[in-house]
């Protein structure tokens, strides 16, 4: 039990001491608010954060559950609750707080309230949103615009608000926004909204596909300019349920039938309503999905005011985000790719298909999300020569593969580290071309997030290749 009743000022109660919780607490404290943070875990890292916040007058309670019973004696002292995106808005405590009349919001709304005078691009989607966010930010920054990427991509919006000064100039904020963040964001209204893709995901949280769709669509409805991916089947089939906007497609035939605004012609040129802008081959990324990402970013950049030549020049030095089809080793004979960001079946399918006809050994595992496991298994059956599985749902993944006709070898391990030397030997002795780390699942059985999982994979690959004394591999940082 903890006591937050002392003091005359109303409380801004921050739930969760992750990156967003840390920075929203600092921002509100700097504005004279009384801030209290509740965090359910306790470890040395969190103790360090607690000490830092304590030093500026913020109370932090570690190892403390977010339960209504613990707060019921202090309800009249609470002005608002800033909820971690990881907490379901249908949580019993959240519902009871709302019933009492307490405002429950997310860090995104606090960031928006403080930065609403700036131009915003809000980017959402099941897959592709990080790449589009990174790509658009890069294009704008290369053209002398200050356009930092923020939100779900890594830097909390409240950190920008905390650091922002009136004499500093930010031209655009490029914000990646997950469904968890949008669900508890009630005020944000971007100048431009982008919807990359839509496939079943996070249904353990959102329950139905319709609810998941409506949460994503809430961001686009509030956007002044809307950009959609016509290549996405669900978005295309539900176009009548969407607000009017700009549509892009990597298929030139779609323009002729459905009047897309941006598309690729047969030679790979990006076309805007009949005007040739530049050749998409300048973007050195694998896969059709990345051509879609390019079109979405180009449509936004054009609406911001850049011409085709300026966009083309900015793409010459663009590099992919870590953990998304990231080549970490390469020789004349084989390639090792880290695609830890493939956290669901659809993202994994896109990554596998991007490798063309190469002979692939795949590593997958973690906690299965809802999605099209049948198409995933069929894609692996068509493209992959062997599968290494690990983690909590390894045996379920094997069952899915066998049920859908996979005929090659399947190996099961408990931990990622156990399978790395075996998969390397398998790749090397059979002269296959690609070892692809494409987990196809969430990371939470063994890792904090996909970044930690991807970094672990890279470390283990480097460790065991050194042991094997692989002579002809070129190592990338």
Image (spheres, helix red, strand yellow):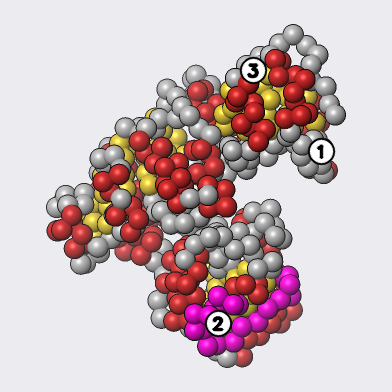
Q: Which mark is residue 63?
A: 1
| Marks 1 & 3, CB-CB < 8 Å contact | no
Residue 272 pos. (x, y %) = 20, 50
Element class at badge 1:
loop
Residue 435 pos. (x, y %) = 56, 77
User: At x 63% / y 38%, what residue is drawn?
Assistant: 91
Q: Which residue is mark 3?
A: 79
Q: In the figure, residue 152 lies in which quadrant?
A: top right
Q: Which mark is residue 402?
A: 2
In the picture, the quarter occupied by the N terminus is: top right
Q: Is residue 176 visible?
A: no
Could you say which is closer to the camera, residue 292 or residue 397? 397
**Is 257 on the left or on the right of 246, as rendered?**
left
User: At x 71% / y 76%, what residue is drawn?
Assistant: 413
Element class at badge 2:
helix
**Position above or below: 59 against 64:** above
Asked whether residue 405 is drawn in magenta, I would say: yes
Q: Which residues are magenta?
A: 398-418
Q: CA distance from mark 1 to mark 3?
A: 23 Å
**Is 458 on the left or on the right of 361, as rendered?**
right
**Is 77 on the left or on the right of 242, as rendered?**
right
């Amino acid at each position: 039990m903890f006591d937050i009743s002392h003091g005359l000022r109303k409380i801004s109660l921050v739930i969760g001491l992750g990156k967003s919780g840390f920075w929203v607490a600092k921002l509100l404290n700097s504005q004279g608010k009384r801030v209290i943070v509740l965090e359910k875990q306790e470890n040395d890292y969190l103790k360090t954060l607690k000490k830092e916040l304590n030093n500026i007058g913020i109370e932090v309670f570690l190892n403390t559950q977010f339960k209504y019973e613990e707060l019921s004696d202090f309800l009249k002292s609470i002005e608002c609750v800033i909820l971690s995106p990881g907490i379901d808005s249908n949580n019993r405590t959240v519902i009871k707080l709302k019933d009492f009349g307490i405002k429950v919001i997310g860090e995104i709304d606090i960031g928006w309230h403080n930065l609403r005078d700036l131009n915003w691009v809000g980017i959402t989607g099941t897959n592709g949103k990080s790449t589009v966010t990174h790509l658009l930010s890069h294009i704008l920054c290369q053209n002398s615009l200050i356009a930092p990427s923020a939100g779900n991509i890594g830097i909390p919006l409240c950190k920008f608000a905390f650091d922002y000064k009136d004499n500093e100039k930010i031209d655009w904020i490029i914000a990646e926004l997950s469904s968890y963040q949008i669900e508890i964001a009630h005020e944000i209204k971007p100048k431009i909204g982008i919807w990359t893709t839509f496939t079943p995901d996070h249904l353990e949280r959102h329950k139905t596909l319709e609810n998941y769709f409506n949460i994503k669509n809430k961001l686009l409805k509030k956007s002044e300019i809307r950009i959609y991916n016509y290549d996405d089947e669900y978005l295309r089939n539900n176009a009548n349920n969407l607000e009017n906007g700009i549509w892009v497609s990597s298929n030139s035939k779609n323009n002729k039938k459905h009047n897309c605004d941006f598309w690729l012609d047969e030679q790979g040129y990006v076309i805007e309503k009949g005007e040739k802008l530049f050749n998409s081959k300048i973007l050195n990324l694998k896969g059709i999905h990345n051509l879609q990402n390019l079109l979405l970013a180009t449509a936004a950049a054009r609406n911001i005011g850049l011409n085709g030549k300026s966009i083309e020049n900015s793409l010459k030095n663009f590099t992919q985000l870590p953990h998304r089809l990231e080549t970490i080793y390469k020789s004349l004979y084989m390639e090792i790719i880290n695609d830890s960001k493939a956290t669901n079946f659809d993202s994994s399918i896109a990554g596998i298909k991007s490798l063309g006809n190469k002979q692939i050994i795949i590593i997958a595992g973690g906690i299965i999300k809802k999605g099209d496991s049948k198409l995933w298994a069929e894609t692996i059956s068509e493209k992959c020569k062997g599968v290494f599985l690990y983690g909590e749902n390894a045996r379920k993944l094997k069952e899915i593969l066998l049920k859908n006709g996979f005929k090659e070898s399947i190996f099961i391990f408990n931990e990622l580290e156990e399978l790395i030397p075996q998969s390397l030997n398998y790749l090397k002795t059979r002269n296959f071309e690609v070892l692809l780390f494409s987990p196809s699942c969430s990371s939470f059985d063994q890792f904090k997030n996909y970044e930690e999982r991807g970094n672990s994979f890279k470390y283990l690959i480097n460790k065991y290749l050194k042991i094997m004394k692989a002579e002809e591999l070129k190592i990338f940082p």
